[in-house]
Image: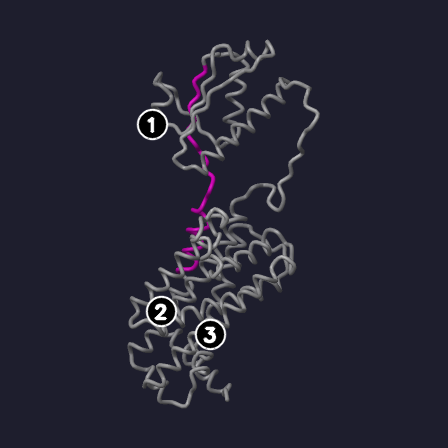
Amino acid sequence: MIAIQRIFTQCKKELAQFHRDRLTLALAFLLPMISLFIYGFALRLQSDNIPLIVQDFDRTSLSSSYIERLYATNQFIPIQWSGENPSHMIDRGVAKVAVIIPPQFSRSIKASSAGEIQVLIDATDVNNARLIKNNIQNVTNFFIKDQQLAQSTNSIKAQIRLWFNPSRLETLYFVPGVYGVVLWIFPSLLTAIAMVREKERGTILQVYASSISATEFLLGKGLAYLLIAISEAFVVIVVASKIFEVGLIGSPIILILGTVLFLINSVLFGLLIGVRSSNQNSAVQGVSLIGFVTSILLSGCIYPLNNIPFPISLIPNIVPTRYYINITRDVFVRGIGWNGVWFDLLILAIFGFILFKASHRVIKKMQLQN
């Protein structure tokens, strides 16, 4: 029979210990904010200020207009051509892109022939090279239309509209993902350290000798760090919404429910790591290795999950951060509602039950041994 009074007593004890430890307070609130700013400002898939060199052999008003249109995108910065072969400048890293305009460029266009240009792109970063290629292609298509150089033989014209994020703001992609990473790592890390500290100080033996059950102990300790995690989540989401201007467009109920379920998973994951670790170093390493790596690389925070090759692509199915990021991106970007996130909420609830049962089994076994 579970005693609610013993659960709340255990919870108050944990909160009191947490309040007295300044290092733990910093780990709970200062480090998550630092991580939020680093990830929110530093993570980018698309580069700006890309050094571009133009070798213009045509030197006409038409070629000059094309060059001006390239720099008007604000994605490229001009690099002065010193007479060196453009490919050598890319080899040395002076330029990332080189555009070479042939001598007969304007004459070929006016004669209704193909006016070809050569574009060399540093593809060390494949994703960025693809974005640069698309950008130059879009500039070229716009220039042809603006200068009325296109032939009127096309009968099909695509009208393209970007859905959900028409301004292509990367903060709308990264910030909801950062919520999942930050709120997975730090609550679990706090809980794991607190659990191991009980073992290192020997106070866990008092728990075993008392009348409190394994379920009551886990619920009491878990409730304390769940309340701390909810405070973390509130501060992180509010501050990020103000700084990065990522506003709520979906249901706040979905955000609250999804966040609470996710934080329950995070706290229970920390408890599981804590009861399985012998010291604080191993607990930190366990959370970092399992929690940090998977939440960053295998959750869809940075890289699309469909780009992950088999069989590693199976791992994201058991990463709770993946499902929470789906929820946050729906609430802050898509706004589809319950129809788009009910499965993610269900999976988080199932994961929470599994983590609790695993932690309970270990604690129960340790109680019996002592």
Sequence order check, earlier mark of 2 and 3: 2
Q: Badge 3 is on which residue?
A: 356
The answer to whether the residues at label 1 and label 3 have Cβ atoms under 8 Å apart is: no
How far is mark 1 from mark 3, CA to CA? 55 Å
Along the line of sight, the residue nearer the viewer: 53 or 321: 321
Compared to residue 179, the image places residue 68 above or below, namely above
Image coordinates for residue 206, horizontal then vertical, percent: 34, 86
Along the line of sight, the residue nearer the viewer: 276 or 143: 276
Q: Badge 2 is on which residue?
A: 22
How far is mark 1 from mark 2, CA to CA? 51 Å
The magenta stretch spans which residues? Answer: 31-56
Q: Secondary structure at mark 2?
A: helix
Residue type, label 1 = Asp
Quadrant in which the C terminus is drawn = bottom left
Q: Badge 1 is on which residue?
A: 91
The answer to whether the residues at label 2 and label 3 have Cβ atoms under 8 Å apart is: no
Report the mark closest to the observer, 1 or 2. Answer: 1
Compared to residue 335, the image places residue 114 above or below, namely above
How far is mark 2 from mark 3, CA to CA? 28 Å
Sequence order check, earlier mark of 1 and 2: 2
The answer to whether the residues at label 1 and label 2 have Cβ atoms under 8 Å apart is: no
Residue type, label 2 = Arg
Image coordinates for residue 116, horizontal then vertical, percent: 51, 17
Corner quadrant of residue 363: bottom left
Residue type, label 3 = Phe
